[in-house]
Image (tube, helix red, strand yellow):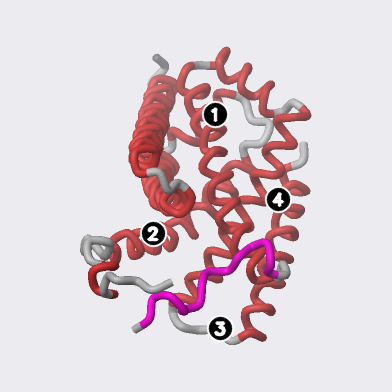
Amino acid sequence: MSTVNRPLSPHLQVYKPQLTSMMSITHRATGVALTVGTLLLVYWLSAAAMGPAAYADAARVLSSKLGQLILFVWTWALFYHLCNGIRHLYWDMGRGLDLESVYRSGKITLGASVGLTLVTWIIAAP
Amino acid sequence: MKLLRSPLSLVRGLGSAKDGYEHWWMQRVTAVAMVPLVVWLLIGLIGLSGASHAEVVQWVGHPFNSGMMVLFLLAMFYHAALGLQVVIEDYVHDEPVKLASLLGMKFVLALLAVIAVVAVLRITLFAVMSDFGG
């Protein structure tokens, strides 16, 4: 077995971006972003646990323009990671792995993540 | 390039420590668990948008919601630690830095998880106090 001439992992600089590879790295990026985003959930729960005054401060921060923008992006990242995670679980069962299915489920995942984000914010809008 | 070392000697010691499957499997277990938990959380948070402190305490303090929240927090922080571990292992190649990053990441996530769970418990105490006129 030669270990010298075997195929190497994709070299990003020479590979054309494709829906599949871009969605793969986006899954990882949203995972990291959502982990950072847990700070928001911990902040919100801690504020509620400290009492009405602390909660009012947190609510003001989260309902500010910047707070709302971060929450909007957080919502999309969560839906993307949820939908694409279900896509991964489907693959783990050995299904939908041919090229056509992979592209179809990719487009469905992208559409669903955007659609669910908009629906959530339309329902939650004050 | 001609290698003088045999293929076996190149991979010896770099292979599985026999816990790789556990990592992969628990990532899937927590992922499956979080599908209903995330749907529950989002529905709850949508209902709480613009809510007062008393309303948040009442919702989080409900036994079903407290239980779901703690389950979500445990599954989510476990899932996050497994995921970030792979990211760090993929991109950090310096061994001491990698070890420090892995330890730091796990300590921070453990701290956040415990803070969040304690906060949920404290909110349930608020809920009990308001139920019994404390």
Mark 2: which secondary structure?
helix
Marks 2,1: beta carbons within 8 A: no
Read off the chain for label 3.
A
Residue beneath disc 4: A120
In which image quadrant can residue A10 be found?
bottom right
Instruction: For label 4, count other residues whose C-alpha is less than 10 Å away and answer few (under 14), some (14-19) or many (20+).
Output: some
Residue beneath disc 2: B27
Task: Please state the extent of the stretch shown in magenta in the rendering.
Answer: A2-15
**What x and y, as percent, mark residue A33?**
58, 44
For the residues labelled 3 and 1, the Cα–Cα distance comes to 39 Å
Residue beneath disc 1: A44
Q: Amino acid at mark 2?
A: Gln
The answer to which of marks 3 and 4 sits earlier in the sequence is 3
**What x and y, as percent, mark residue B48?**
62, 37
Per the image, is A62 magenta?
no
Marks 3,1: beta carbons within 8 A: no
**Residue closer to the observer: B81 or A112:** B81
Q: Quadrant of the N terminus of chain B?
A: bottom left
Q: Amino acid at mark 4?
A: Thr
Read off the chain for label 4.
A
Instruction: For label 2, count other residues whose C-alpha is less than 10 Å away and answer few (under 14), some (14-19) or many (20+).
Output: some
The answer to whether marks 3 and 1 sit on the same chain is: yes
Residue beneath disc 3: A96
For the residues labelled 2 and 3, the Cα–Cα distance comes to 20 Å
Read off the chain for label 2.
B
Residue B54's place in the image compared with A93, above or below, is above
Q: Amino acid at mark 1?
A: Trp
Residue A91's place in the image compared with A73, above or below, is below
Numbered marks: total: 4
The mark closer to the camera, 3 or 4, is 3
